Amino acid sequence: MTSPHEALLPSTERALLHRVATAQAEGRAPSLVGAVARDGQCVWSGARSCVDGHAPDADTQYRIGSITKTFTAVLVMRLRDEGLLDLGDPLEKHLPGTGVGEVTIAQLLGHSAGLAAESPAPWWERTSGSLRPELGDVLGEKPLLHPVGRRHHYSNPGYTLLGSLIEAMRGNSWAAVLRSEILEPLGLTRTSTRPQAPHAGGWAVHPWADVMMPEPAEDLGLMAPAGQLWSTASDLCRFGGFLADGDDRVLSAESVCEMRAPSVPPEAGEWESGYGLGLQLVRRDGRTLIGHTGSLPGFIACLWVSVEEGVAGVALSNATSGPLTGAVAADLVGIVAEAEPRLPEPWRPMPVVDEQLLELTGPWYWGTSAFGLKLVAERGLELYPLRGNGRGSRFDAGEGNRWTGLDGYFAGETLRVVRRADGSVDHLDLGSFVFTREPYDPAADVPGGVDESGWRGLR
């Protein structure tokens, strides 16, 4: 396999179909569709159904529930990138009169605003949105259950507020903004707020008998930004590629990467999962997956993306409960990533060489700890420990002799080259840490100085 868009090996396809078939049978689902994408392109899809000879395909719509939240979060990030708001802004600044105006936009995106998980009764997912015509009907009399910003507490009303924020700032409905700013640019022609044929019907399967009953498909009204959408496996594969790489027509790679960063610490005992800005984050079988799960009466769904491996997995089913779509989507990613791992890009030398930067490469010492400094593309630098565990980071080039840390302990910190009067390098300064060419180099400016008698043995 030389291209991520070539067909998968027959053995891989057989393993994928077996996983989907097992999930449909053991989960007692009317139908289940699975799909896999490489770098945003769907390379496999398969389905199983309880109706002989009539299985859905990757173009069949299913309701995707809370995967909708990721779309809503992207719209909010677009407002931020346009300079119309800051994620640290209190909601009151842009959407006054909610009664919870002290919470910030970032807290709403990451579910740390302290809001209740659900709206007041009756259950909003199975009743018409017309029962909740105002934000006060969604929030209830006691909307805040936890101290603002202190813990992760998943909140559907929080995303209702974000949807209303989008409408207030765009002067248009959430659905119209979604269509013009995400669906049309990305070519998600089979994603919509209302079902469009061909689409699956939602079913509840009896827990103790092999019988089923249709579920109502309600219009969620104000709650739509939290879970209204219908989509297909094919469209979600394409959306997964966007969540990995960004698309300047919608949201830059840098902003999408920001969405993938944990927004608050996970709850105790949940160290294998977290939440970014509209994205769930999980660790499974040694890999990090980003995406979202979703459910509404009659439907369960999941989209997981392994950004590092360039693989996305989608699982959609038309059952209220039963098949574990989150586990299925993760397994689909794992099957492809392990059977047909991504080919690395060929090594290529830099187009030009900066002699002054080349001079900086090689070993450096922080005290007695040895580090290596490597020059990479676009004047970037990598600093890494040469022995054992230590603090390493990648650095992005700035103006002059300065670089900014991109990850690890030194993320956001400044790496600076300090030169002597004659232009030669004295040392590197990294957030006040001094790196010298020799351990405690007597010719360099070492904090605390160097003992005059130098290194010695034991006598």
Image (spheres, grey):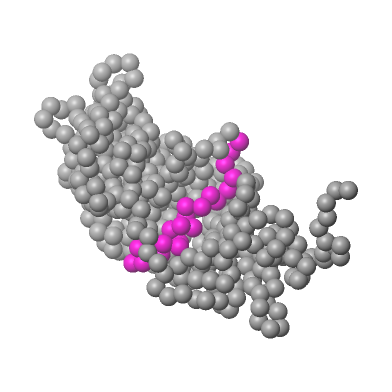
Q: Nearer the viewer, residue 345 or 97?
A: 345
Residue drawn at 50 percent across, 71 percent down:
379
**Can residue 354 be seen in the rendering of this structure?**
yes
Residue 66 horizontal/vertical position (percent):
39, 44
Q: Residue furthest bottom?
A: 422
Q: Residue furthest top?
A: 208
| Magenta stretch bounds | 247-268
Left or right side of 217 for 116: right
The answer to whether residue 220 is above or below residue 76 is above
Residue drawn at 37 percent across, 60 percent down:
347
Which secondary structure is most common in the magenta stretch? loop
The answer to whether residue 56 is above or below residue 431 is above
Q: Does 136 lie within the magenta span?
A: no
Residue 341 horizontal/vertical position (percent):
33, 44
Q: Nearer the viewer, residue 95 or 304?
A: 304
Residue 371 horizontal/vertical position (percent):
62, 57
Q: Quadrant of residue 331?
A: top left
Residue drawn at 19 percent across, 37 percent down:
10
**Can residue 127 be seen in the rendering of this structure?**
no
The answer to whether residue 279 is above or below residue 367 is above
Q: Does 259 lie within the magenta span?
A: yes
Left or right side of 137 for 44: left
Left or right side of 270 for 207: left
The answer to whether residue 310 is above or below residue 420 is above
Residue drawn at 62 percent across, 67 percent down:
415
Q: Residue furthest front?
A: 459
Q: Nearer the viewer, residue 274 or 88?
A: 274
